[in-house]
Structures are given as structure tokens and as C-alpha cells.
Image: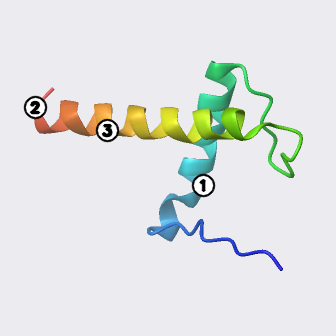
């Protein structure tokens, strides 16, 4: 039984988030695919998510600073 708690809070953003995730993975040199990624390590998968959060926070900070 799989317990997937990765739910998009704004369903309309799901496609954009998936595209962003693939762009980040490419930037980091991680061979992420649309399907199953069990061949990747936890560190690889975690680095994609962590870098996504870092970039989103940076974008929000710039927005808040009026840049």
C-alpha cells in the first residue's frame, strides 16, 4: 500500500511544478524521468526538492523586495 502525501495545494499549478522539477533536475545533472525514479538515491531526489524550495524562496524574497 502506497501512502502518497504529495498533494498540490493549488491543482492548477501541478503542471508548472512538474516542469519546474524537471528543469531543476536537469540543472543539477540528475536523470529524473516522468515515471518511476526508484533508481535514484534519496540524496539525488532530495537535492531536487531542496533546490526547488531554495529557488522559490529566492523568487518570493525578490518579489517582496520589489525587484
Q: Quadrant of the C terminus?
A: top left
Secondary structure state at the residue bearing disc 1: helix
Which circle's residue, 3 or 2, is located before the other in the chain?
3
Residue 14: x and y in percent read 56, 59
Q: Quadrant of residue 21?
A: top right
Disc 1 to disc 2, C-alpha distance:
27 Å
Q: Which residue is mark 1?
A: 15
Classify residue 20 as left or right of residue 2. Answer: left
Rendered residue at 50%/32% (across/down): 51
* Image label count: 3
Residue 65 got which mark?
A: 2
Residue 57 got which mark?
A: 3
Which circle's residue, 1 or 2, is located before the other in the chain?
1
Return the residue nearer the eye: 28 or 3.
Answer: 3
Above or below — where is 57 with respect to 25? below
Determine the residue located farthest toward the bottom in the rendered image: 1
Q: Quadrant of the N terminus?
A: bottom right
Rendered residue at 80%/29% (across/down): 31
Circle 1 crowding by C-alpha within 10 Å: few under 14, some 14–19, many from 20? few
Above or below — where is 9 with respect to 64? below
Secondary structure state at the residue bearing disc 2: loop
Residue 44: x and y in percent read 70, 32
Marks 1, 3: nearer the viewer = 3
Amino acid at each position: 500500500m502506497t501512502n502518497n502525501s504529495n498533494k498540490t495545494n493549488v491543482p492548477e499549478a501541478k503542471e508548472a511544478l512538474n516542469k519546474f522539477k524537471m528543469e531543476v533536475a536537469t540543472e543539477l545533472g540528475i536523470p529524473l524521468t516522468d515515471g518511476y525514479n526508484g533508481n535514484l538515491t534519496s540524496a539525488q531526489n532530495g537535492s531536487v526538492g531542496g533546490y526547488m524550495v531554495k529557488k522559490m524562496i529566492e523568487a518570493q524574497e525578490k518579489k517582496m523586495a520589489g525587484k
